[in-house]
Image (cartoon, helix red, strand yellow):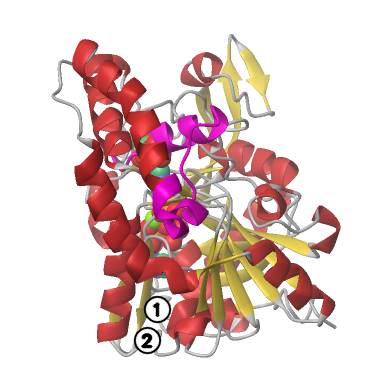
Amino acid sequence: MAKNVVIVGVQWGDEGKGKVVDILSEHTDIVVRYQGGNNAGHTVIIDHGKFILHLIPSGILHGNKICVIGNGTVLDPLVLIEEIDTLKKSGYLRDDSHLLISNEAHLIMPYHKKLDLLKERVKGNLKIGTTGRGIGPAYEDKVARNGLRCKDLLNEEVLRQKIKTNLIEKNHILKNIYHDHGFEVHEIYYKYTEYAERLKSYITDTSTFLNNAIDEGKNILFEGAQGTLLDIDHGTYPYVTSSNAVAGEAATGSGIGPTKIDTVVGIAKAYLTRVGEGPFPTEGMGEEGDRLREQGGEFGATTGRPRRCGWFDSVAARYAVKVNGIEGLVLTKLDVLDELDKIPICTAYEYNGGRLEIFPSDNFILGDCEPIYEFMDGWKTDTKGITTFDELPQNAKAYIGRIEELVGVNVIMISVGASRKAAIMIKNPFIDM
Ligand code: GDP
Ligand code: IMO
Ligand code: MG
């Protein structure tokens, strides 16, 4: 029976969603990105090398899958064109009909990128630590009903008019608030007509395409970007991204009904990382953290920034299970913990002298929470190359089991290395869930 599965980040992003989507793509016909933009960096390592995908779904490396960029995304057309070119050079996306871009997806414009950087600069200590890719300002324009959409690339007159109207306001802000020189209509118009030429064959009504595919009994995998704690509503506001990163957005951001989603799978690292500013109760591993950052390669796939590292937080994970409706958990990067003697797991927080079991998304409260740890024995064995659950060391099994107990959801896959092969599949969401 056909299945529609949503993949969602449980933590602050970079959980290894790209790798998991790549593995699960084998079992689906279509892969859809439904929110975010090129703030995302999804790494996939296969025999042909390492690919970091920012916009195109990670299923593209499977040759015969249809990849869809949904209406809930914001697209920087130049980044998308570069990504298409890189994939083509490596022998992927040979058939252009395998990539569909929603005509309702919003465009990131040059003034969005500039405003993102300038807004951060004036915030000083209160900055969010954005990726500087124009994501926030592009979503601001979407909600303000000023945005340009991919369909506007298909009509030169509409495109020019919308750029002109937007620049009246944007140049006023850029010049008078940020003392910047602003933009000329013709420079943006000229560039965007060139982009339109490159992208127009991919732009279509993807909602109708997906609904027809569902009627035909096709399997669909929805690839989330960012993570639950970066969600604009449910994350650690204001230290979040500007879109809904939770599973519910898979429906809104791709134009299908929520009743069509069969299951939601949450991706969680066996520890925790965060890029950018904002509270992070289990942060701080001392020297071990530096070692773990090196071993886990914890440097941003988009910006190269060192990621902040901390221990697994089951309070946050329980919260993510609730707001997403997660029915299965994928635990990634277990191998990064291989050498540790003791591994702390945060079971609850201490706040105001009391015990807090429920995640406070209010970032002032969260900032004052102290983690309460339980210490698990390490396994001190190399787990790389293990492909079955039975082969895992006993203490690794105990660590996984304790996470399942604390979070209340079964682990359905364990990742023990960056490559496609380094995974232990316990339950396949397309077959067993
Ligand atoms: P995403 O944004 O959720 O797709 O994750 P990123 O690609 O930004 O970050 C995850 C990083 O961890 C990438 O460099 C992956 O190659 C790597 N990775 C994924 N799974 C594993 C794993 O199980 N073990 C190790 N050592 N690395 C992994
Ligand atoms: P993937 O899909 C980790 C973070 C930024 C910043 C905040 C807001 O690879 O997991 P933005 O540019 O979105 O306005 O920045 O969100 N952020 C991510 N952190 N992984 C990501 O994506 C992220 N996308 C945005 O670091 O703190
Ligand atoms: Mg990433």
> Residue 319 appears at what percent x and percent y?
67, 38
Using the image as rendered, state which of residue 213 and residue 334 is in the foreground.
Answer: 213
The number of numbered badges drawn on the structure is 2
Q: Which mark is residue 92?
A: 2
| Viewport quadrant of the N terminus | bottom right
Q: Residue at x 30, y 45 (%)?
A: 307
Picture quadrant of ligand 3 = bottom left
Residue type pointed to by label 2? Tyr
Q: Is residue 287 above or below residue 432?
A: above
Q: Secondary structure at mark 2?
A: loop
Which label's residue is closer to the chain start, 2 or 1? Answer: 2
Examine the rendering and report whether any part of residue 20 can be seen. Answer: yes
Q: Nearer the viewer, residue 380 or 23?
A: 23
User: How far is disc 2 from disc 1 in space, using C-alphas?
Assistant: 28 Å
User: Which residue is under mark 1?
Assistant: 384
Three-letter amino acid code of the residue under disc 1:
Lys
CA neighbours of label 1 inside 10 A, class few (<14), some (14 to 19), many (20+): some
| Position of residue 312 in the picture relative to residue 199 (left or right) | right
Mark identifier at residue 18 = none
Query: Seen in the image, is 430 located left or right of residue 232?
Result: right
- Would the CB of label 1 be found within 8 Å of ligand 1? yes
- Decide if residue 349 is on the left or right side of residue 321: left
Q: Based on the displayed image, in which of its 4 quarters is residue 419 positioned?
A: bottom left
Find out whether residue 149 is within the magenta segment.
Answer: yes
Q: Position of residue 322 (x, y in %)?
A: 74, 42
Give the magenta part as a residue range: 132-158
Percent of width and height locating residue 393:
52, 74
Query: Which of the 4 image quadrants contains residue 102?
Result: bottom right
Viewer-side label of 2, 1: 2
Mark 2 burial class by Cα count in 10 Å: few <14, some 14-19, many 20+ = some
Is residue 71 in the magenta section?
no
